[in-house]
C-alpha cells in the first residue's frame, strides 16, 4: 500500500515537471510530429485489422442470437453500431494500444535511463521529462480519438463485408440499423474516453520507463508494469467516465 | 574554477562521500582516481547535480551550485559538457543530430551555422564522414569522440569525463586522453576526469586526487604519485605484478 502511494506521489511529481513550459517550441513541435508518427500513425494497421474483424464478428454473433422473428433484422446493424461506438472502439482499442504503445514508450525511455542518455540531457540543462514525455502525451491524447473514429468506421465496414459474404441479413437492413436512433453524443463520449485512455497509457508508461532501474531486466520489468497498470487504469476510468457521461 | 567544501553524501545510511574538499582550476586536467565502489562516480554526479549532496558546498567560481534553484542550475549546466562512461549518445539521433542537440535547445543559430559548428567539432576530434551514421553504426572509440564533440559543442567552461577509457584498447585510450587534455588547454576548460586507468594518470594528470572508501586520501600530480607514501594509494597504483616490479626499480 505504501509502495503504491509512493508511486502515485512520484507519478504526480513527474507530471508536474512534464507539464512545464517546453524549453524550446520548435524542438517540441518537431518531437510532437515524430511521436505522432510513432505512436498514432504506426498503430493504424493493427487497429484497422482488428476493427474490421471485430465488426464482422459482432454482426455474425448478433445475427445468430436474434432468433425471434418479432425482432427486426435491422437491429443487427443497430447493435453492432452501439457495441462498436460505446465500448469496442475506445476501451478495447485502448487496451490493445496499452500493450503496443505502452511497452514501446516504457522500453524506449527505460533504455535511455539505464544508458545514461537521460542524465546526459539533464546535464545539458534540458528538461528531459518535458522533452521526452510531453510530446508523446500531446500527440496521443489529441490524435488517438481520430484513431477511434477510424476504428468505428472500419468496424462498421467489417460488418458490411461479412454481410456481403454470408448474406446473414441484407445490406439495406444493416444500413437501416446503423442509422437507427443514431446519437452523435455517443461518438463524442467515445472520443473523450479515448483521449483520457491515451493520456493514461502514455503518462503511466513514460513514468515506469523514466524511473526504470536495474539494467535490461529492469527495463523489461518496467515495461510489464506499464502495461498492467495502464490496463487497470483504463478499466477504472472507463467506469468513472461512463458513470459521469451516460448516467 | 570548481571548489568543493566538506561534501558529504549518504545512500540508505551508508556514508559514501566523507568530507571531501578540493579545488580544480581552468586549463588543468584534474583526475579523480580510486577503486571501483570508492565513490568516484557519486562525487562526479554530485558535482554536475545528478545527486544532491547531504551537506557541503559545490562552487562554480562564485556560484554555490548545490543551493541554486532548478532554473539557476540550468544556467550553469549550459556551461558544462560531460562525457559518459558509455558515451550516452542518443540512440534516436544520428551523430550530427547528437552534436546539434544542445544547439537546438540553447542557440538561435540557423541550420547552416549549426552544421558548421558540428563539422568543426567533428574535425576537432578527428572524425570525418560520420555525420549521418547512428551511434550503433560506429566503433566504441568513435562514440567516445562523438561524445567529446557533443560535450564541446557549446564551448563549455567545465568538462566532466566519467571513465573516458572504459572499454577502449590502450592505444585508443591514449588518443582520447590526449584529445581531452588538448581541448582542456586550448579552450581553458576546467576538466574533471574520473578514472582508474593509471595510463591516463601518467599521460594527462595535471592534478590527481585519490579516493578511498569515500575519503579523499591523497592529492598531488602525476609527477609525485609514484613516490607517494600513502599505503592505500600504493596498493591501488602498484596493484599489478608489473607495477610492483617498477616500484621496486624506483
Image (cartoon, coloured by chain):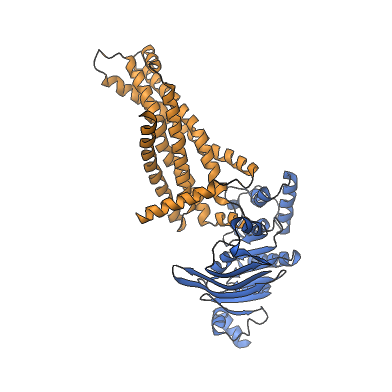
Chain colours: A orange, B blue
**Residue B244, above or below B55:** below
Residue drawn at the location 52% of the way across and 33% of the way down: A143
Residue drawn at the location 58% of the way across and 81% of the way down: B243
Is B129 on the left-hand or right-hand side of B14?
right
**Residue A169, above or below A86:** above
The answer to whether residue B1 is visible is yes
Residue drawn at the location 46% of the way across and 50% of the way down: A11
Number of disc labels = 0
Quadrant where the image shows the C terminus of chain B? bottom right
Residue lying furthest left:
A68
Question: B172 and A132: which one is in front?
Answer: A132
Question: B9 and A120: which one is in front?
Answer: B9
Quadrant where the image shows the N terminus of chain B? bottom right
Is B35 on the left-hand or right-hand side of B77?
left
**Residue A205 x/y as whole percent:** 45, 46
**Residue A204, above or below A2:** above
**Residue B98 x/y as whole percent:** 64, 51
The answer to whether residue B142 is visible is no
**Residue B143 x/y as whole percent:** 62, 57
**Residue B244 x/y as whole percent:** 57, 83
Question: A6 and A156: which one is in front?
Answer: A6
Amino acid at each position: 500500500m505504501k509502495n503504491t502511494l509512493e508511486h502515485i506521489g512520484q507519478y504526480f511529481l513527474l507530471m508536474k515537471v512534464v507539464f512545464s513550459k517546453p524549453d524550446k517550441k520548435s524542438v517540441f513541435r518537431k518531437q510532437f510530429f515524430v511521436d505522432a508518427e510513432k505512436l498514432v500513425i504506426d498503430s493504424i494497421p493493427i487497429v484497422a485489422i482488428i476493427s474490421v474483424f471485430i465488426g464482422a464478428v459482432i454482426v455474425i454473433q448478433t445475427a445468430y442470437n436474434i432468433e425471434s422473428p418479432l425482432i427486426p433484422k435491422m437491429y443487427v446493424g443497430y447493435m453492432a453500431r452501439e457495441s462498436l461506438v460505446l465500448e469496442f472502439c475506445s476501451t478495447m482499442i485502448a487496451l490493445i494500444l496499452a500493450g503496443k504503445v505502452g511497452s514501446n514508450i516504457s522500453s524506449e525511455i527505460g533504455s535511455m535511463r539505464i544508458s545514461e542518455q537521460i542524465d546526459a540531457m539533464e546535464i545539458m540543462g534540458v528538461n528531459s521529462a518535458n522533452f521526452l514525455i510531453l510530446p508523446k502525451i500531446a500527440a496521443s491524447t489529441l490524435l488517438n480519438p481520430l484513431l477511434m473514429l477510424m476504428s468505428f468506421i472500419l468496424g462498421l465496414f467489417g460488418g458490411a463485408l461479412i454481410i456481403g459474404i454470408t448474406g446473414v441479413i441484407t445490406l439495406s437492413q444493416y444500413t437501416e440499423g446503423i442509422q437507427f436512433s443514431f446519437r452523435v453524443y455517443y461518438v463524442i463520449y467515445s472520443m473523450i474516453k479515448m483521449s483520457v485512455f491515451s493520456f493514461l497509457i502514455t503518462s503511466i508508461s513514460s513514468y515506469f520507463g523514466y524511473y526504470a532501474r536495474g539494467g535490461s531486466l529492469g527495463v523489461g520489468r518496467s515495461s510489464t508494469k506499464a502495461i498492467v497498470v495502464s490496463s487497470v487504469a483504463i478499466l477504472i476510468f472507463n467506469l468513472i467516465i461512463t458513470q459521469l457521461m451516460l448516467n | 574554477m570548481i571548489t568543493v567544501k566538506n561534501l558529504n553524501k549518504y545512500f540508505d545510511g551508508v556514508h559514501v562521500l566523507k568530507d571531501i574538499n578540493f579545488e580544480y582550476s581552468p586549463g588543468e586536467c584534474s583526475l579523480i582516481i580510486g577503486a571501483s565502489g570508492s565513490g568516484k562516480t557519486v562525487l562526479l554526479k554530485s558535482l554536475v547535480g545528478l545527486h544532491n549532496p547531504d551537506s557541503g558546498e559545490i562552487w562554480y567560481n562564485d556560484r554555490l551550485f548545490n543551493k541554486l534553484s532548478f532554473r539557476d542550475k540550468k544556467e550553469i549546466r549550459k556551461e558544462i559538457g560531460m562525457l559518459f562512461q558509455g558515451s550516452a549518445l542518443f540512440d534516436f539521433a544520428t551523430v550530427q543530430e547528437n552534436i546539434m542537440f544542445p544547439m537546438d535547445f540553447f542557440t538561435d543559430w540557423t541550420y547552416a551555422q549549426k552544421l558548421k559548428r558540428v563539422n568543426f567539432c567533428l574535425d576537432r576530434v578527428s572524425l570525418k564522414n560520420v555525420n549521418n551514421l547512428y551511434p550503433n553504426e560506429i566503433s566504441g572509440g568513435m562514440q567516445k569522440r562523438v561524445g567529446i564533440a557533443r560535450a564541446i559543442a557549446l564551448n563549455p567552461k567545465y568538462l566532466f569525463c566519467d571513465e573516458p577509457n572504459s572499454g577502449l584498447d590502450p592505444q585508443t585510450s591514449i588518443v582520447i586522453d590526449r584529445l581531452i587534455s588538448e581541448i582542456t588547454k586550448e579552450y581553458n576548460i576546467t576538466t574533471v576526469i574520473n578514472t582508474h586507468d593509471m595510463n591516463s594518470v601518467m599521460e594527462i594528470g595535471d592534478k590527481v586526487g585519490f579516493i578511498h572508501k569515500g575519503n579523499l586520501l591523497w592529492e598531488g600530480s602525476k609527477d609525485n604519485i609514484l613516490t607517494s607514501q600513502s599505503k592505500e594509494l600504493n596498493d591501488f597504483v602498484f596493484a599489478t605484478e608489473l607495477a610492483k616490479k617498477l616500484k621496486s626499480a624506483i
